[in-house]
Amino acid sequence: MPETDGSALVDDLAARIRAKIMSGEIPIGAPLRQADLAAQFGISRTPVREALRQLQTGGLIEVVPNRGAVVRVPVPWEVREAYEVRAELESLAAKRAVDRLDDATIAELRAVNTAMYERSVALAAGAAPEHDGTANDQFHGLIYEASANTRLTRMLGEINDAFPRNVSALVLRDSARHREENFREHEALLEAFAAGDGVLAADLMRQHVLRAGEHLAHWYERRSSTVFTG
């Protein structure tokens, strides 16, 4: 296979493995065995090894003694740093979105928020299968889109892609208090949008993201103490 084709194959494979990690299909702490991945994707081990090396360089996986490559568990300070930056960027996105959100989009945001809350309650009760957190991404993504700033949206996407997207849903599942807070904070933000109050929307979004970051950091902190035991 020509080198360019080989590089494209490795990049595509890394993207596909990344997608499985981000959705939670391959959970944090899970082993990434070259033979299993090669069989799953119908390819040789060589591109799998290179794809894993690429993901390791990006910080998504790590090599653990006596276990090999595993999906990396982020440490709390990484989460807090990322969410500190995200809070400021999302605050800007919310402020810009105020003058650009129409009634139909605000109604869509309300529907997404309600569906996300109901899904989280069902998930906590064991009445729904685990999911990948796309509802929360959809909610915030609509605001990114309304901000009409491509660079801002891209920067937020890069921060969000640093952590598996299903974990936010698991955090909501594991904490009834956080579920209620998350729903109410989204609703308050929507009221600010409807009122056309950009300053309030920016402040609410900043505080919302910082609190979400704290919940996420605590979740990873608890998870890191158990994920590699046994």
Image: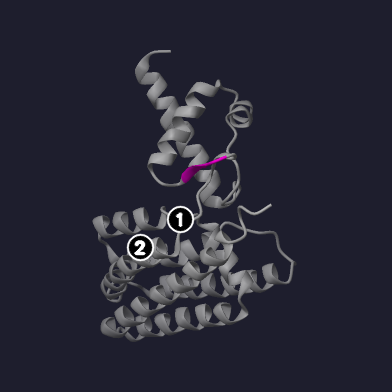
Q: Main secondary structure of the magenta part?
A: strand
| Residue designated by label 2 | 82
Image spot of residue 39 (x, y percent): 63, 26
Q: Amino acid at mark 2?
A: Ala
Residue 46, relative to residue 208: is it above or below? above
Q: CA distance from mark 2 to mark 1?
A: 10 Å
Q: Which mark is residue 20?
A: none
Q: Is residue 90 magenta?
A: no
Circle 2 crowding by C-alpha within 10 Å: few under 14, some 14–19, many from 20: some
Instruction: Give 112 or 140, whichever is nearer the viewer.
Output: 140
Name the element at disc 1: loop
Q: Quadrant of residue 6?
A: top left
Q: Who's the residue at 51% across and 44% down the image?
A: 19
Q: Could you tell me residue 179's position as x and y percent?
A: 57, 77
Q: Quadrant of residue 103?
A: bottom left
Q: Which residues are magenta?
A: 61-65
User: Farthest residue toward the top?
Assistant: 1
Q: Is residue 156 left or right of residue 33?
A: left
Q: Are marks 2 and 1 in contact (CB under 8 Å)?
A: yes
Look at mark 1 in the image and give the residue it sits on.
163
Instruction: Report the quarter where the N terminus lies.
Output: top left
Amino acid type at image mark 1: Phe
> Where residue 124 appears, x then y in whole percent?
68, 71
Left or right: residue 154 versus residue 69 is left
Instruction: Give yes or no for residue 64 being in the magenta stretch.
Output: yes
Query: Pointer 1: residues within 10 angstroms few (<14), some, or many (20+)?
Result: many
- 101 relative to 157, above or below: below
Is label 2 in a helix, a strand or a loop?
helix
**Is 99 on the left-hand or right-hand side of 138?**
left
Q: Is residue 61 left or right of residue 89?
A: right
Q: Nearer the viewer, residue 79 or 88?
A: 79
